[in-house]
Amino acid sequence: MLRPKARLLQGNEAASMGALAAGCNFFAGYPITPASEITEYMSRELPVRSHPFIQMEDEIASIGACIGASLAGAKAMTATSGPGFSLMQENLGYACIAETPLVVVNVMRAGPSTGMPTNVSQGDVQQARWGTHGDHPAIVLCPSTVLECYTLMVRAFNIAERFRTPVIFLADEVVAHMREKVILPEEDEVEIIDRRRPTVPPDWYVPYKTDGSLIPRLADLGSGYRYHVTGLVHDDRGFPTRRADEVEPFYTRLFGKISRHFNDLQLTENYMTEDADYLIIAYGCTARSAQAAVRLGREQGIKLGLLKLQILWPFPRRAVESALEGKKAVIAPELNMGQISREVKRVNDGRSLVYRLGKMNGSMITPDEILNRLREVAK
Amino acid sequence: MKQIHRGVVYDWLRHDKKFPHVWCPGCGLGILLGSLMRTLAASGLEKDEVALVSGIGCSGRLPVYVDVGSVHTTHGRALTFATGIKLFKPKLTVIVVMGDGDATAIGGNHLIHAARRNLDITSIIVNNQTYGMTGGQYSPTTPPGYKAATAQYGHIEPSFDISALSATAGAAYVARSTVYHVTQLDKVLGEAIAKRGFGVVEVLSPCPTNLGRQNKLGGNVEMMKTLKQSAMRIEHWEKASEEERAGRIPIGTLVDRDLPRYLESYKKVCEEAARRRQEACA
């Protein structure tokens, strides 16, 4: 069969297709706008492949089923929006401490609470980082185009599998619901990473013992490796412990397994930044307005560039630091009151002048609003 | 030299787990642990064919002592994890251990939906009528009038009948037993695990440390005696008069029925989906 090269796809559709391309073989979810298209897509496609799809009784149950399936060997995903994402926070922490690979999609809508169903927002950026209790690392990817819904979703699964950790796919209502012409990569062009499973005989398997990567090997439940999984802090064998000499290495490794590979997680894109005097740092749907602002600004003689963030957490400070270098001023537009701009200010450390541009009225930031803000600060 | 057989409990116990266990003297959970291991040994299942899942609370600490794949999940959510495990690995025998607060308060929603869905999962709900681990606060099964750490003037809420709740929600198998009636407990656990469909075994168990102390119910011996005296086999219960039933609790197999099972139905969905896709592509 000939594959059509170009097709018109919705962001949520492309995200679902990316998940399937990455090997997603389990989905549990609960309906919520603007994420329901993903749940519906998976309910149509997974049975064709004889993989489980289930609509659970709530979002807590959805992520719980995904963690259970992942421990049994599945590449599992759930999809939700703000209210459901809030409900998932406790189990998200469980996936973190039990080091369970998992992809959680949060298509952001305006909150808090029921907020404005379902106008666009980027208000869950800090929640995605700090939503679950207790200090922990977090990995959060953020698409700004329909194509990125596909490509970043593949990366989300690969990162989850490689690092044995939940990955949050933080889309927004505009990117999830809009349709664009996209040319998807051929299936054989998609790089797929699977979790490392134990190769030693079951008697030798120590579930949380690691090598230099700090990422332990994960055995599927029922595969001959019998061990204990718990949300309690545990020793190398997986048994609960409160001994300081076992607890401290555990936490150190939990953070270290991400920070040791920090350079692999600098997912950003530069747009006309080489000769830029002024810089916009943006993500999600706001990056689209920012890109237009760069073009408009350049037509008007302003040397403007864009650094687009495709990963929000861990904050890609290497890429941001070098982009800040030598800029007269930097604007961080976003659909909240300054959740990423505070991070930019944190890493700026005197390199440039950083200004926020927050908007919370249920609509996108326009290119003109960005340019006006620039004129204001560049006076 | 004569080989000493140490017994099935020794065989199914996880030997690299540090002891002593976490439970108070007089707790019924140790009896349930023994019963579960005897039942598993008698079931003919291999250790690698079993996944044992629990929530949070005293009962949540049970799976770690059994030499099978064990998952100690979050409070109230054990059934959701178990659902994911069973859906992805249908060949695994999935057994869930919960407490009364775990299963019917914070996890009540998951219990009724799991029962309705009818996956092949066995739920063991240990009912000690209190939140033991946190110090004896009232649970959905604390009887009205009882004292609790959060009901110092007497508990005012009616209590759940866990077995009736599970049956109404659609469980294929429901049994009630106690840690006093161990022979029966072994039997109903075996039936529930063998049952094709969602099974619930409600296990009445004493908590002398918290429920007993606050309500002057005596120690473990007195509370075990109460279990012995208040329980009535379902066969007798069905013939008993209202007067004879007063203050008594029916035990035994309460529900055993065949209902459409989720995994079989889902298999048909997959076949239909594949057929339609093939037609569309042809």
Image (tube, rainbow, N blue to C red):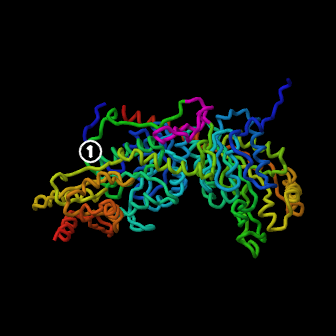
Residue drawn at 41 percent across, 68 percent down: A115
Which of the pair B129/A329 is nearer the observer? Answer: A329
Q: Quadrant of the N terminus of chain A?
A: top left
In magenta stretch: residue B257 = no
- x, y percent for residue B53: 64, 46
Q: Position of residue A33 (x, y in %)?
A: 41, 58
Magenta span main SS: loop
Mark 1 falls on what kind of element? strand
**Most foreground residue, A352 or A44:** A352
Q: Is residue A180 visible?
A: yes
Q: State which quadrant residue B142 falls in.
A: bottom right
From the viewer's perspective, tell me whether residue B248 is left or right of residue A107.
right
Q: Is residue A236 above or below residue B179?
A: above
Q: Horizontal and vertical percent for residue B165? A: 69, 57
Is residue B273 visible in this depiction of the protein? Answer: no
Tell me the residue at 52%/43% (across/down): A70
The answer to which image quadrant residue A226 occupies is top right
Q: Is residue B92 left or right of residue A324?
A: right
Query: Which residues lie in the magenta part?
Result: A200-225
Position above or below: B109 against A254: below
Left or right of A186? Residue B100 is right
Q: Which residue is mark 1?
A: A182
- Dot 1, how many residues are within 10 Å of its Cα: few (below 14), some (14-19), or many (20+)? some
Q: Quadrant of the C terminus of chain A?
A: bottom left
- In this rendering, the count of numbered labels is 1
Q: Please say whether residue A202 is one of the residues in the magenta stretch.
A: yes
Kindly identify which chain the residue marked by label 1 belongs to. Answer: A
